[in-house]
Amino acid sequence: MRILVVEDEKKVASFIKRGMEEEEFSVDLAYDGEEGLDLAEANPYNLIIMDLMLPKMGGLDVIRQLRKKEINVPVLCLTAKDTVDDIVAGLDSGSDDYLTKPFAFAELLARVRALLRRGSQDRGAEIVFADLRLDPVTHRVWRGDKEIDLTAKEYGLLEYFMRNPNQILTRTMIAEHVWDYTFDSFTNIIDVYVNYLRKKVDRDFSLKLIHTARGMGYILKEG
Ligand code: CA
């Protein structure tokens, strides 16, 4: 497993590198956004740990550039900012998870493992619901004949819906299954993500599949 760490604080960068290497990961370091983008484009990383406040190019811009080029490597954002707006901005750019500084290494490691597990799972045959089709091996999704381009997190959310159709999924269930932990006060991140997914999966189609179960959560069902 090969990880890229983009972090301009050299102490933090080498702390993460040392810890990850003890866990048998190989780690490359970049100290600014441009270097991080260059490395991420040139190498097939399993995961990127991205600081947001970086010289030359901010972390969110790096993530946007990667997603624009359809490089869908899982990205864990690290930042000192901890407001909901910042978290939402981070997720909006196409990152997959978010950890605020200061953090415990054990928590970083747990989240890295969760993202990697999700990214590398080969979970067999295609799943079909209505005219939605999802391939768990290639992570490709189609609605009818149209292929739908999803970020890693949107994909994880849709797969969870499609493996549990016609039942209400609460925000807590979604947080635990798709993010592997509970957000506590940040459950609106789930709403933000469901809205992204709806835009891609439902907006251009007359039959809506993702529905709000008011006061409870969401449900995948026909009509
Ligand atoms: Ca920084």
Image (cartoon, helix red, strand yellow):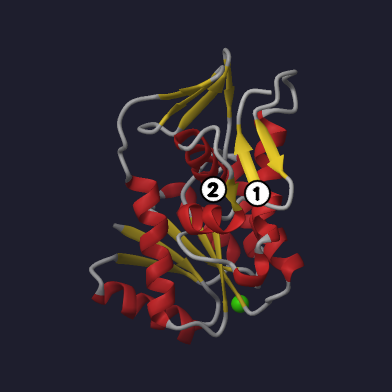
Disc sitting over residue 217 in the figure: 1
Residue 49: image location, x then y, percent: 48, 65
Placement of 129 over or under 194, stated as above or below: above
Q: Which of the two residues, 103 or 37, is positioned nearer the viewer here?
A: 103
Between 7 and 221, the one nearer to me in the picture: 221
Mark 1 burial class by Cα count in 10 Å: few <14, some 14-19, many 20+: some
Where is residue 134? Give x, y as percent: 46, 27
Q: What residue type is labelled 1?
A: Gly
* Residue at 67 percent of width and 51 percent of height: 216
Quadrant field for ligand 1: bottom right
Q: Is residue 54 visible?
A: no
Q: How many labels does the image show?
A: 2
Image height of 60 relative to 163, above or below: below
Number of other residues with Cα within 10 Å of mark 2, as a class: few under 14, some 14 to 19, many 20 or more: many
Q: Quadrant of the N terminus?
A: bottom left
The numbered dot on residue 153 is 2
Separation of disc 1 and disc 2 at Cα?
A: 18 Å
What secondary structure is found at the residue carrying circle 1?
A: strand
Q: Is residue 199 left or right of residue 179?
A: right
Closest to the camera, between mark 1 and mark 2, is 1
**Residue sticking out furthest to the top:** 145
Q: Which residue is at the front of the view, 193 or 79?
A: 193
- Residue 105 is situated, as x and y percent measured from the top left of the image, at 40, 80
In this orientation, which residue lies closer to the viewer: 128 or 114?
128
Q: What residue type is labelled 2?
A: Lys
Q: For the point 45% across and 78% down, which residue is it?
A: 13
Give SS at disc 2.
helix
The earlier-in-sequence mark between 1 and 2 is 2
